[in-house]
Amino acid sequence: MTMLNRKSLALAIILAVIMGLLTSENAMACASCGCMLNTDMTGSFSGQPGLRMDLRWDYINQDQLRSGTGTISPVAASQKENNGMSQEVEKYTVNNFVTLGIDYSEPTWGVNAQIPYINKSHETLGTASDGYVAGPGGGQYFSSTGDLGDIKVVGRYTGFTEEHNLGLRFGFKLPTGSHLETGVSTDPTAPGPVPIDRGLQPGSGTTDIIFGPFYSNSINMNWSYFAQALFQKALYSCDQYRSGESYNVSIGTIYSGISGVVPQLQLNFRHVLRDTGDQADIFSTGGTLLYVSPGASVPISYNSSVYAFIQLPLYQDLRGVQLAPTFTTSIGIRYSF
């Protein structure tokens, strides 16, 4: 098979997989996990040509109420005001994201698709609680959803240097996820299905632009590092909702001097503006986050490896009252063709 035919076959595989996932009832993928954890430092940043596929599971248990830079009790949260109304007190949000990543690289360009399946359970006491017991008319509900999320397709160019280690990403988040999911009311004064908060939906309903630079290099034969920045902004509002634009920066290092395991360490910074629109929670969205993310990858064959990361918060400054995790975990398997 000629090189041209192999390239054409690789691109055809990418398109076929993406189209198959978009049209399959059982399509699986993952959503963004808050901070920009990069689980492919040795792949997409290396400039090595070829096709790579990645299947990743992220677990995020948001069980801690926070306001500003500290925690807040449910009672104190219920006494806050949100635009003249009582503050909603959320109990928990448990997220399980499964993401299929498809990456194709040439020496000076590449394209990456992230296809998320989102399983999310959420319960809120609504806006009429004392922090522990829901009150009538507070809009309290329970929801458990599983659906395709918003797909990201991002290209990159690395022709700025001879080493191809300086690049620029540009792409889009597509409105493939539903933003019309419903939960079950637990308010006896208003039984039946109720809309899930827009910030908890599998999709935002909007197309977002994504772009930013990245750089990678070696320190010596065992140590290498990378830095990347990404900006994401919704291009329009959908059904009176627009998610806040985000600014993301990550730096990381990798050590390859140990046989059989490759330890890695990252710092992930994220700043998000408040959501806007009549369907948005303007008061309790947005904030600034800094995570440290240790992890490791283990080769299991010449073409494949498994990896695991844990994200631990170093700094959290959240607007209003929001649920936050005490840690997040990411586990995955990667295969290079």
Image: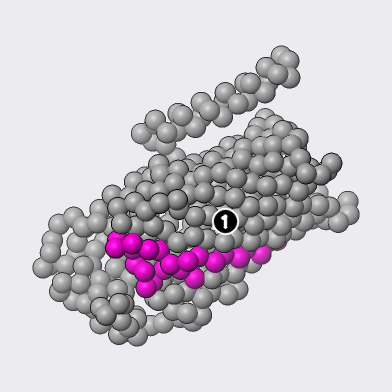
x, y percent for residue 132: 27, 79
Most distant residue in the front direction: 236
Any part of residue 111 in sight? yes
Q: Residue at x 25, y 74 (%)?
A: 127
What colouring does the structure picture have? one colour
Quadrant of image for the C terminus: top right
Give the vertical position of 274 relative to 334 (above or below).
below
Magenta stretch encompasses residue 334: no
- Which quadrant of the view contains residue 227? bottom right
Q: Which residues are magenta?
A: 263-287
Q: Looking at the image, which residue is at 38% across and 72% down? A: 284
Is 235 rendered above or below residue 87? above
Position of residue 12 in the picture relative to residue 178 (left or right): right
Q: Nearer the viewer, residue 19 or 211?
A: 211
Callout 1: 10 Å neighbours few (<14), some, many (20+)?
A: many
Relative to 161, is 21 above or below? Answer: above
| SS at mark 1 in the image | strand
Q: How many marks?
A: 1
The residue that label 1 is drawn on is: 231
